[in-house]
Amino acid sequence: MSNEWIVQMKNIEKSFNRVPVLKKVSLQVDKGEIHALLGENGAGKSTLMNILGGIHQADAGSIAIDGEEVTMTTPKVSQELGISFIHQELNVVGDLRIYENMFLGSELRNKFGFVKEDEMCRQTEDILAKLGVTLNPRGYVRDLDTSYKQLIEISRALLHRSRLIIMDEPTTALAEHEVERLFNFMAKLRETGVSIIYISHKLKEIEAICDRYTVLRDGEWVGTGSLEGTELDQITNMMVGRSVSEERFVQDHAFGETVLEVKDLSCEGAFSPVNFSVRKGQVIGFTGLEGDGRTELIETLFGYRKKSTGSIKINGKSVKIKHPKHALKAGLGLVPKDRKENAIIKDLNVIHNLTLSSMGHFEKTGFIQEKREKSRFSFYRDKLNIKLHNPTVTIDKLSGGNQQKVVIAKWLEVGPDVLIFDNPTQGIDVGAKREVYQHIIDLAKEGKAIIILSSEAPEIMKVCHYIHVMYQGEITAGINGEDATEDLIMSYATGSKREVGEGGKYRNAAKAKQ
């Protein structure tokens, strides 16, 4: 890695509506390094990168590229200076071919105005070859794995001779093998002298791929250093201003009656017959590797998919769930993993997002009682520690952690007997994660029956009284939370061990005791 730097941001300040967001923040990125930009949601990372990308302009401070001070007036200026921004939501067009995506908006044409398809394909192949990848440039992007779609964005940046690529949470939607593939691409870029600013909340990934880090907290620079020889706990402490323990959040309390009982539930082609139950005050978890069938299981339980076999009882009564509205009526609530697609309406304000699923609570003689809406929002803002200045702003203005709290509040207002969380802390920072975990445990203590789906074993171990491990559409083990280890969970998640027999019934009845 070179000791020369490519970009230097000094004493950057930025305010929105007179509220300071960045306070004299500095960042230096060396040539040919992968630099982690860390901090909780709301720490100022996105604002700093938007200033570097020309989307916002700094109120004070300076930016230098290769030692020469520049003014990032527009995104085009930033791109011309060799900076590309790959956002968390991929910016590719599935119905276009690979080469068409690569040259979208900058197509090569001959003197007659016709596109030079062969030349664009050749250049596409050349750039992909630099990353050690062979793809048919005439293939459609929709047919690619997510990691290859990200590769198209990276390759497009190289096509425009980008020397610094900003990656914002690039692994959020990736399977484990795709993450490894992306890291290989990033390593090849580093070898060619390209620099990368890597934004992620997953510190294990930071440790695996990054060279140095910079931490922001509450809009201020906290520290910069080398990853080599630095403990992750030290970085976490810098991010949140306190030590974040790995202890379990679960507290002992008595469980109530069985709320949900599932027997021999299956969906052909998705998962085999499974059996499980959850009681009042209990938190159970489902975990495994990508493609284990847990998402399909919950989609079937909630009425998004048609079941093949099995029965569902809620509070001792058999229910037929053929549509999500049936699930709601039966007492099920679902906090989905993809907030932006399935849990919020980004163009509505925060209050309306909260009350959207329980409008009947606020309607009287055909009119919505706005005062009652605001009152209930104030109640949940205090209960869940939702941080915002103005609840009438659109919800997309909130950090990921605060959006998730609003989604949780929405379901608490609905009042389901069983609350299902699908990857509840996806895309939120370590401090907000801790708050979400505590809210889940508090809900359990209040008597809610909780189901958590997560691909992160440590998350499941933190909050669950009981853990179901799935492998290729089957439950392969049931583990008491206090007995679970990552190694034990992984042995069942990979199919190397198995404690469950045919039909999803435990071989040893004692192991199934919850």
Image: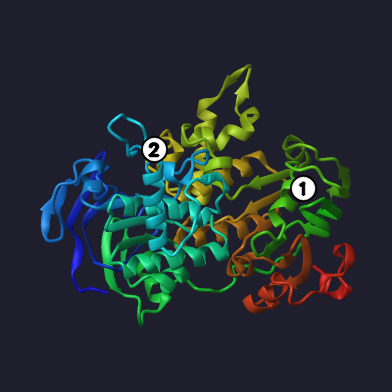
Hey, what amino acid is under mark 2? Asn
What separation in Å lies between label 1 and label 2 (alpha carbons)?
37 Å
Mark 2, residues whose alpha carbon is within 10 Å: few (<14), some, or many (≥20)? few
**Does residue 285 appear left or right of residue 5 in this picture?**
right
Residue 392: percent from the left, percent from the top? 42, 33
Q: Residue at x 45, y 39 (%)?
A: 395
Mark 1, residues whose alpha carbon is within 10 Å: few (<14), some, or many (≥20)? many
Split into 4 quadrants, where in the image is the C terminus?
A: bottom right
Q: Earlier in the sequence, mark 1 or mark 2?
A: 1
**Does residue 415 appear left or right of residue 73 in this picture?**
right
User: Quadrant of residue 220 in the image?
Assistant: bottom left
Hey, what amino acid is under mark 1? Leu
Task: Pick the residue in front: 160 or 85.
Answer: 160
Say if residue 41 shows up in the picture. no
The residue to which callout 1 is attached is 301
Residue 465: percent from the left, percent from the top? 70, 67
Split into 4 quadrants, where in the image is the N terminus?
A: bottom left
User: Quadrant of residue 280 in the image?
Assistant: bottom right
Which numbered tag is attached to residue 390? 2
Q: Residue at x 53, y 74 (%)?
A: 246
Outermost residue toward the left?
Answer: 68
Task: Pick the residue in front: 9 or 99.
Answer: 99
Secondary structure under badge 1? helix
